Amino acid sequence: MSRIVYVNGAYLPEEEAKISVFDRGFIFGDGIYEVSAVIGGKLVDCEAHLARLERSCGEIRLALPWSKAELVAVHEELIKRNNLDEGGIYLQVSRGAADRDFPFPKDVQPTLVMFTQARNFVNAPGAKTGIKVVSTPDLRWARRDIKSVNLLAPVLAKQFALESGAQEAWLTEDGVVTEGASSTAWIVKGKTLISRPLSNKVLPGITRKAVLAYLAESGFTFEEREFTLEEALDAEEAFITSATSLVMPVTTIDGHTIHNGAPGPTALRLREIYIDYARKGGVLG
């Protein structure tokens, strides 16, 4: 049985799901996306993802005709129709379909597409062994805080990582780590977590926000600053966060072993806390 996907108000078998060849998401990358995790059949941080969706759409002047409640309802219906226990729900909204022309078209309805992907998050093998990361220059545009569907640079970085035997790429600019190709980058020194400040240069990670909400419980402090690739190689621990990796320890960067080469206690503890949080349906407290 094929997946049921959502396209512009209709729930359809994936083989029947279609959008226009004139859709601006396809022609120009004129759209925004989000991915919400599902663990134990429950949405994790969906409200925060939809708040970020709303912000990103506002930054490109794309008016959303759906309320957050309506979008949550579609998420929940897709979970039900696809019997999804663990995985993610991808949402993409574009400015809509119109004959190809660069300026915004008038009186066009945005296109909304959503689908599920079953994945093993909680027992992902990388959580036990740690993952390998490679560095590569950050080739993206100047508004990385907008979760745009323009993902060619991350695609190239991910392919470079795959061909290098790694699972993620850390993007660098002037020797400083900006973020992962699809994740937030962290290092650990003592009981201090370090990750760069939010700005137009990085995506405001939703999992990042959830991890920081549990700092007091975890016993760690947070230092929000830039760090260099050299500093990362010398760190006691490194890890990434994202909706699809949760909290994932990094044990190798550019072939250099981090500390003793084993997943660090900080990353493992934060992962444990986050999974417990996720199983509650992503509810803080």
Image (cartoon, grey):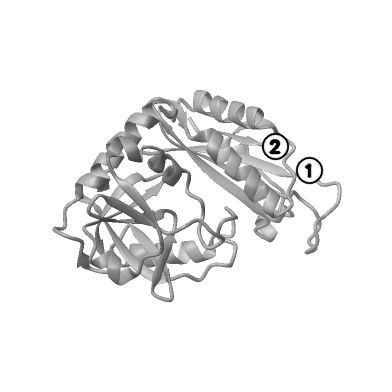
Q: Residue 123 location in percent, x, y? A: 27, 37
Task: Name the kind of residue labelled 1 in the image.
Answer: Gln
- Which residue does the image show at 25% across and 40% down from the upper left? 269
The answer to whether residue 251 of the structure is visible from this angle is yes
Q: Residue 244 location in percent, x, y? A: 41, 44
Q: Quadrant of residue 236?
A: bottom left
Horizontal side of residue 203 vs 192, given as left or right: right
Secondary structure beneath dot 1 equals: loop
User: What count of labels does the image hold?
Assistant: 2
Q: Residue 176 location in percent, x, y? A: 40, 70
Q: Quadrant of residue 29?
A: bottom right
Count residues near mark 2 (Cα–Cα under 10 Å), then give few for <14, some for 14-19, many for 20+: some
**Measured along the vertical axis of the image, is residue 1 above or below residue 173?**
above
The answer to whether residue 123 of the structure is visible from this angle is no
- Which residue does the image show at 29% across and 38% down from the upper left? 218
Horizontal side of residue 96 vs 127, given as left or right: right
Of the pair 123 and 99, the residue shown nearer to us = 123
Q: Which residue is denoted by mark 1 in the rendering?
A: 109
Of the pair 117 and 196, the residue shown nearer to us = 196
- Which residue does the image show at 58% across and 47% down from the upper left? 33
Q: Which residue is denoted by mark 2 in the rendering?
A: 8
Q: Most extreme residue toward the right, as rendered?
A: 106
Task: Name the kind of residue labelled 2 in the image.
Answer: Asn
Q: How far apart are the alpha carbons under marks 2 and 1?
A: 9 Å
Horizontal side of residue 160 vs 128, given as left or right: right
